[in-house]
Amino acid sequence: MPAFGSANTPPIDSYAFLSDTHTGALIGADGAVDWFCVPHFDGDAVFARLLDRRVGGAFTLSVGGSAEPVRRYLPGTLVVESVYRAAGGSAVGQDFLAVQAGDAAQPFRAGKLLVRRLHVRAGSVRVRAEVTPRPGYGSRPAEWHRDDDQWVAGDAGLRLVSELPFRVDGATARAEAVLHEGQTVDVLLGYGPGRIDAVDPADLLEETRRTWREWSDRADYTGHGREQVRHSAAVLRGLSFDETGALLAAPTSSLPEEIGGVRNWDYRYTWHRDAALLLLALFRLGHAEEGRRHLHFLLTTCGGAGDVLSPLVGIHGVTREEEILDHLDGYVGSRPVRIGNEAAHQLQFDTYGHVLDAALSYQQLTGELTGTQWQVLRRHVDTMAARWREPDHGIWEIRGPLRHYVNSKMMAWVCLDRGVRLADLVGDHDAPIERWRGERDAVHAEVLERGFDRGVGSFVLAYDSTELDASLLRMPLVGFLAGGDPLVVATIDRIRWDLAIAPALIRRYTADDGLPGEEGAFLLCSFELVSALVLAGRREQAAELFDQLRAYAGPLGLYAEQLDADGTALGNYPQAFTHLALIEAALNLDGAGDRDALHAWAERTARQGTAGG
């Protein structure tokens, strides 16, 4: 455990992640729920001890005298099992957010209950529970009152039910009891409106396990990294907001990219740069309905965007203004703590490419794009045809002047290329295809001329610069150049060595981004290096790198956004980008071809006339 200067501050990747696809919770090995937002992922954090251990609030269930429990996810689920061993006995606990199977419109049904069970296997144990909500991201204490058999913290939107003898002490509901062999206790914390209905927690556990297992078992993938792929898919499902089909980048805000630093951002948003990869991964792993729902959300938000696409949107399709919460100290003193994300107002041309790439893959797999949806997409292709020569903020949201970022030009090419192909697929004979083709070829030629620096021997971050950018590893993955092209191979080698901070770990870029300090290795890019190596014909090197990255996973198989050189997890957690790139890398290793496995699979599926589920 890294020495953060505070012995009771858990490492970021030691937390377990729970989800009911409406909200999520992070639980430490000490049995404390240190992060919980209600009534949705992007709502008020009523437990925010993750960001301030003094005032943040938490929900702790612990076994007295026990060493740190042995924890695992029950296979195929987001149910966490913890085994406790104390001097007087042993116990096993299960923590989960209750779900049940829904329907096509809403595949998961949230029970809106955080359930914590503890069963004594042998001897006797002393169990302690404390529930201290702090609404307003820890800005004020909650007020408890009794409502028949339930405790209510109305201003926090919470209800508490348990056979444990809870009493209220100020803002904290506390209980303590000695349990004997064979006894089971449950603590239920509801966050929905109204009372907690009479339920059997054992039935809730079984129903939640079954719902997750049935979902996970749809995947028929048996290739490279099978278990990591299945687990990553479950994490992505847990990060999907079931009301709209949106995918969160992460369920947390302001976990630092540098311990004690200022690089602290709110990631409870959907970034369109995930769109194509998420859709392809969902369809490939047998989760077509979730893919359809995400594409619908994507095109709905893009349809109301006018000609300028925001790089990110909230899970309800809107965003909030960025603000600083001065009352919170931040994770291990990493300030400021931010909610909202100013990057929503940036101009990022790569967004257009990701959206069109997702739409093309969707049409290849289903043929279900409507005329209205195509008109939305056609408008955005026209925008790129007219504007790709302009500078923008770039994919990494550097809060500085506009530049001619090479990744943005590459993704403008993707937008135009996919627009040309989609027009043919949907039979739009009035689309200005020849104009789009001309602009597509022009941007390709310009990137080859101005985006590759002969002195550096690599494609670079921006025109007229010598800075490196790991996002350019996606060149062969999106088909801009072949994986074995000498320019691509040279770029892979330069990025691999010059952006490395530790074995298998690479930074995003070398540019001065105007912020003090520096971030860690970006795990999305580290996994994309695996895929790029496969497409360059270096499968053995790619497999070795993949195995090294697998070893960096947290104790519960989860990844944050970044890692420091010593393996310390950094940034928001768990990170959808990272788990998506892991799936892509595994599938490329399994295919070991000269084309991206997911795009190639979509095209084969289209030729075979099958619909992906």
Image: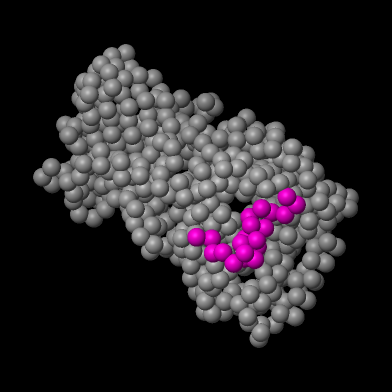
Which residue is pictured at 31% across the width and 45% down the height?
A: 207
- Asked whether 612 falls inside the magenta stretch, the response is yes
- Asked whether 319 falls inside the magenta stretch, the response is no
Q: Residue furthest top?
A: 87
The location of residue 552, given as percent across then percent down, is 59, 33
Q: Is residue 249 above or below residue 442?
A: above
Which residue is pictured at 74% across the width and 37% down the height?
A: 540
The location of residue 2, given as percent across then percent down, is 54, 27
Q: Residue furthest right?
A: 455
Which residue is pictured at 25% across the width and 38% down the height?
A: 202
Q: Is residue 477 left or right of residue 84?
A: right
Q: Is residue 207 left or right of residue 423?
A: left
- Quadrant for residue 145, please give it: top left
Is residue 341 something that shows in the picture?
Answer: no
Q: Is residue 556 left or right of residue 407?
A: left
Q: Is residue 121 left or right of residue 256?
A: left
The location of residue 385, given as percent across then percent down, is 70, 75
Is residue 280 something that shows in the picture?
Answer: yes
Judging from the image, the colouring scheme is: one colour
Q: Which residues are magenta?
A: 593-613
- Quadrant for residue 380, please give it: bottom right
